[in-house]
Image (tube, rainbow, N blue to C red):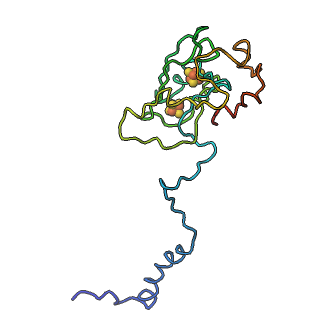
Amino acid sequence: MADRPSEGKTLKEQFWDPVAGFGVTFRTMFKKVVTEQYPFEKMPTAPRFHGRHQLNRWPDGLEKCVGCELCAWACPADAIYVEGASNTDDERFSPGERYGRVYQINYLRCILCGLCIEACPTRALTMTNEYELADDNRADLIYEKSDLLAPLLPGMEQPPHPMRLGADEGDYYRGAYAVSPKETGTVAATGEAS
Ligand code: SF4
Ligand code: SF4
C-alpha cells in the first residue's frame, strides 16, 4: 500500500509550510506595481540611451554630414553605407567640400554600439532616444538619409542653398557664425541629439 502524503511529516510541514509559500504572494500584493503597459504607455529612457541615429543640421538647415565615410569605417557591423558627392556653388547641401549624397543605416545589422557617432568629425551623426525599430519586413529596416535627417526647425531652410552663417566653411566648423545664434537657434535648436 502506498504511503499517505502526511505520514512522517511534522505539524509544521503539514500546515505551516504550504501557507508560508503564499507569503511572497501576499507581500507583493501591497507593493507598487512595476509592470509597464508598453506599448500603450511609453516609459522615458535614460538620457544617453543609444537609439535611432540622427543626421544633424546647422542652424541654417545645411547638413553637417560631409560624406567622409568615417562612420562607415568605424562600424563593426558594417551597417552604414555612405556615398559622398561634391557640393557646387549652385547646389550646396553642406558647408564642406562634399556632402553625403547617399546615407543608409541597416538596422538589421546595427548593434547600437555608438562607435560611428564617436568617429564622426562634424557631430553630424548622433543617436536619439527612439527605440522602436521593429518592422515586419527587412527592406524597411534599412533607413535612408531622408529617414535619418533631423527635421527642419524654424529658421532653417531646406538644402540645397548657399551658406548663410558665414563667409566660408571655417566659420561653420569654428562656430563663428555671421548671424547671431539667437536669430538662428543654438546648437540645441538644430535638433542635435546626444
Ligand atoms: S551604432 Fe555601432 S553597429 Fe550601429 S551603425 Fe553605429 S557603429 Fe555600426
Ligand atoms: S555622418 Fe559624420 S562620419 Fe559619417 S559620413 Fe557624415 S560626416 Fe562623415
Identify the residue shown where x is 51% and y is 75%: 24
Location of residue 18 with respect to 148 vertically, above or below: below
Identify the residue shown where x is 58% and y is 38%: 128
Outermost residue toward the left in this view? 1
Q: Is residue 70 visible?
A: no
Instruction: Name which quarter of the figure residue 94 lies in.
Output: top right
| Residue 85 percent across, percent down from the top left | 53, 12
Q: Is residue 101 left or right of residue 66?
A: left
Quadrant location, the C terminus: top right
Of 18 and 30, nearer the camera is 30
Q: Is residue 188 left or right of residue 119?
A: right
| Residue 187 percent across, percent down from the top left | 70, 31
Q: Is residue 139 left or right of residue 30?
A: left
Instruction: Name which quarter of the figure residue 30 lies in.
Output: bottom right
Identify the residue shown where x is 52% and y is 22%: 73
Q: How many marks?
A: 0
Of 151 and 24, nearer the camera is 151
Instruction: Name which quarter of the figure residue 9 lies in.
Output: bottom left
| Residue 1 percent across, percent down from the top left | 21, 89
| Residue 104 percent across, percent down from the top left | 47, 26
Of 177 and 114, nearer the camera is 177
Q: Which quadrant of the picture is home to ligand 2? A: top right
Q: Is residue 36 visible?
A: yes
